[in-house]
Image: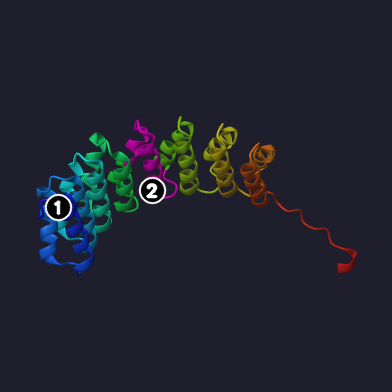
Amino acid sequence: HGAYEGVRKAAVDALAKLVEKGDAAVIAALTARLDDDVHDCVRMAALSALAHIAEKGDAATIFAIGGCLADVHERVHTAAVDALAKLVEKGDAEITAALTEHLASNKYRVHTVGALAKLMGKGDATGIAALTARLADHGCGARIAAVNGLANIVEKGDAATIAAVRVCLADANEGVRTAAVDALAKLVEKGDATVIAALTARLADNRWCVRVVAVNALANIAEKGDAATIVAVRVCLADAYEVVRKAAVDALAKLVERPTPRSSPLSR
């Protein structure tokens, strides 16, 4: 309760180190800082401390932290999202819904999207719909986070998500295109002709970082001996960037069938 915010922040940081996990009195004192303290640095420190001290699943603390999602300061919002990611049980529908609600209007969407992906269970339909909607976000950071999140929570072979992520291969931002290539490599079944064709087109991308991940993805998705893919990857051996050329060499080693050795007269 000191007059200076620096002292209060130092007190919060110290308590996080000194008390045992689950200390009810300290948790109550820190929770009070979330509402009462006028300085964002103290609220942020209190959130970080609560994430460390409170037990996972502590409903009262989670509820208090959830109120900070609407904080006007970015770093307080971010600290709240991080704290929830540590304290909430994976698949908690109520918290997932709260984070989803903040996505549409929140200017700090990138961090929220990432946390949402961590908190959702595999195949969570509500969360998948929320992340899919963020693929059209005006901020490239949110689009990247959404693509990465979908890659981790969607079941392999999910046709609707694969189609949505495939559209991101044509995104104006190279980071989104790169994330989409990586995500598709995780989501599709081996030999998926449509995705292989889409990734093959990325071998001509104007950014080397997209070309290299496309080569790596094709090496894992295409069937061994796939003639069309081998021809396309072979072109990358002449790429201007060494990292792309090396990736092409490694990919061809996976894709090209080795000729059956002829029997030697000595083995007869």
Q: Tell me which amino acid carries mark 1.
A: Phe
User: Which residue is at 83% across, 58% downward?
Assistant: 262
- State the CA–CA distance, disc 2 to disc 1: 28 Å
Query: In the rendered view, does 60 fall on the left or right side of 131?
Result: left
- Asked if the stretch drawn in magenta spans residue 150, the answer is yes
The local secondary structure at tag 1 comes to helix
- Asked if the stretch drawn in magenta spans residue 199, the answer is no
Front-most of residues 119 and 5: 5
User: Which residue is at 37% across, 42% downward?
Assistant: 145
Of the image marks 2 and 1, the number of the one nearer the N terminus: 1
User: Which residue is at 46% across, 42% downward?
Assistant: 179
Looking at the image, the residue that sits furthest to the bottom is 20
Please determine whether, in this image, residue 264 is positioned above or below residue 162.
below
Q: Is residue 268 visible?
A: no
Q: Which of the numbered marks, if any, corresponds to residue 63? A: 1
Badge 2 is on which residue?
Answer: 154
Front-most of residues 79 and 192: 79
Residue 180 % position (x, y)? 46, 40
Total marks in image: 2
Residue 26 % position (x, y)? 13, 63
The local secondary structure at tag 2 comes to loop
Q: Quadrant of residue 138?
A: top left
User: Which residue is at 48% across, 31% downward?
Assistant: 170
Residue 7 % position (x, y)? 17, 55
Q: Is residue 28 visible?
A: yes
Instruction: Give the residues in magenta.
Output: 131-158
Residue 140 % position (x, y)? 39, 35
Q: Tell me which amino acid carries mark 2.
A: Val
Query: In the rendered view, does 232 fall on the left or right side of 64?
Result: right
Query: In the rendered view, does 143 fall on the left or right side of 80?
Result: right
